[in-house]
Image (cartoon, rainbow, N blue to C red):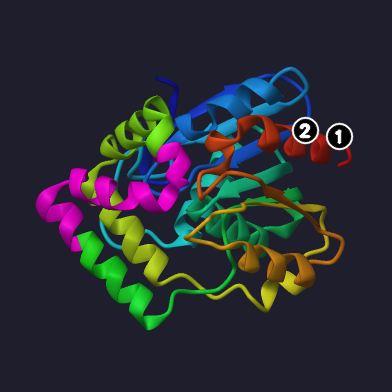
């Protein structure tokens, strides 16, 4: 385990490779192993840092809703500790919410953005109520029920039926999430700021990736981001759902490597 004391927690993280730094932020309810294939693909030409967000993986949990700004503060503190002034900041799903919060808080530290299977808008009232219910369920019953309910929404039907090893890997990753950490993240997502107006002010190179069959953050959300972020690049990953970096790793990595070669 590689960990460091930052803010009020012990934070687990990966730090490999050499070259221009790239920070990859995982989604909910995953951990930094979500990025294993991307880390392996990038490490020859880039320094890749992938934290376990607080409450996930090897990082400690904390009390109270974990707002996206708190996660972003942790990322900034980790970069400080690793003496990284500026980096490409990438995030998938909730990690994208964190990346946008980071870009809004400390824009000078963002060399470029990678936004995968995510969106800028806040939750609807219905969405907030769903997260409140899921948070209660995580604390009272653990992660198994939530994992089983989420899996069909995360992956394409083809993946669910034909790739049991990937389904198991993702389910196992979700089961390692601390119930209290997952609950606090759910409450934080429910409270997150709407970034719809902010994204039109983004001026750094931005890559937007989305699975063609993403049922959680549909292609239309990414198309809207693409239209609002000047000069952004949109890549739709074919035959992939919400976890597009694992379902179609080659497509995802090709797009990511191609983008990084230009920034």
- The x and y percentages for residue 233 are 81, 54
**Seen in the image, is 250 located left or right of residue 32?**
right
- The x and y percentages for residue 132 are 25, 69
Q: Is residue 21 above or below residue 87?
A: above
Residue at the spot 57% in from the left edge and 43% down from the top edge: 244
Do the residues under discs 2 and 1 have CB atoms within 8 angstroms? yes
Residue 222, quarter of picture:
bottom right
Tell me the tag on residue 257.
Answer: 2
Can you identify the residue that label 1 sits on? 261
Q: Kindly state the secondary structure of the residue where label 1 is placed.
A: loop
| Front-most of residues 216 and 239 | 239
Q: In this view, does 148 lie above or below 233?
A: above
Residue at the spot 81% in from the left edge and 58% down from the top edge: 232
3D distance between C-alphas at marks 2 and 1:
6 Å
Numbered-mark total: 2
Residue at the spot 29% in from the left edge and 45% down from the top edge: 61
Q: Can residue 201 be seen in this snapshot?
A: no
Residue stretch in magenta: 136-160
């Amino acid at each position: 385990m590689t960990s460091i004391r930052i803010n009020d927690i012990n934070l687990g993280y990966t730090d490999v490779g050499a070259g221009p730094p790239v920070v990859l932020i995982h989604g909910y309810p995953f951990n930094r192993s979500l990025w294993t294939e991307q880390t392996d693909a990038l490490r020859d030409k880039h320094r890749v840092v992938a934290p376990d967000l607080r409450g996930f993986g090897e990082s400690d949990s904390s009390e109270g809703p974990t707002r996206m700004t708190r996660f972003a503060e942790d990322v900034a503190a980790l970069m400080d500790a690793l003496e990284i002034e500026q980096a490409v900041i990438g995030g998938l799903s909730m990690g994208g919410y964190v990346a946008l919060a980071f870009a809004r808080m400390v824009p000078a530290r963002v060399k470029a953005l990678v936004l995968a299977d995510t969106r800028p808008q806040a939750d609807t009232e219905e969405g907030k109520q769903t997260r409140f219910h899921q948070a209660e369920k995580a604390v009272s019953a653990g992660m198994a029920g939530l994992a089983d309910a989420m899996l069909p929404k995360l992956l394409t039907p083809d993946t669910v039926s034909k790739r049991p090893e990937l389904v198991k890997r993702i389910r196992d990753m979700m089961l390692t999430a601390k119930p209290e950490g997952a609950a606090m993240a759910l409450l934080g997502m429910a409270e997150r700021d709407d970034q719809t107006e902010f994204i039109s002010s983004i001026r750094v190179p931005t890559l937007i990736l989305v699975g063609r069959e993403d049922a959680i953050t549909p292609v239309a959300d990414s198309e809207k981001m693409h239209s609002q972020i000047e000069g952004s690049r949109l890549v739709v990953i074919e035959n992939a759902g919400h976890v597009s970096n694992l379902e179609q790793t080659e497509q995802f990595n090709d797009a990511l490597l191609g983008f990084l070669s230009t920034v």
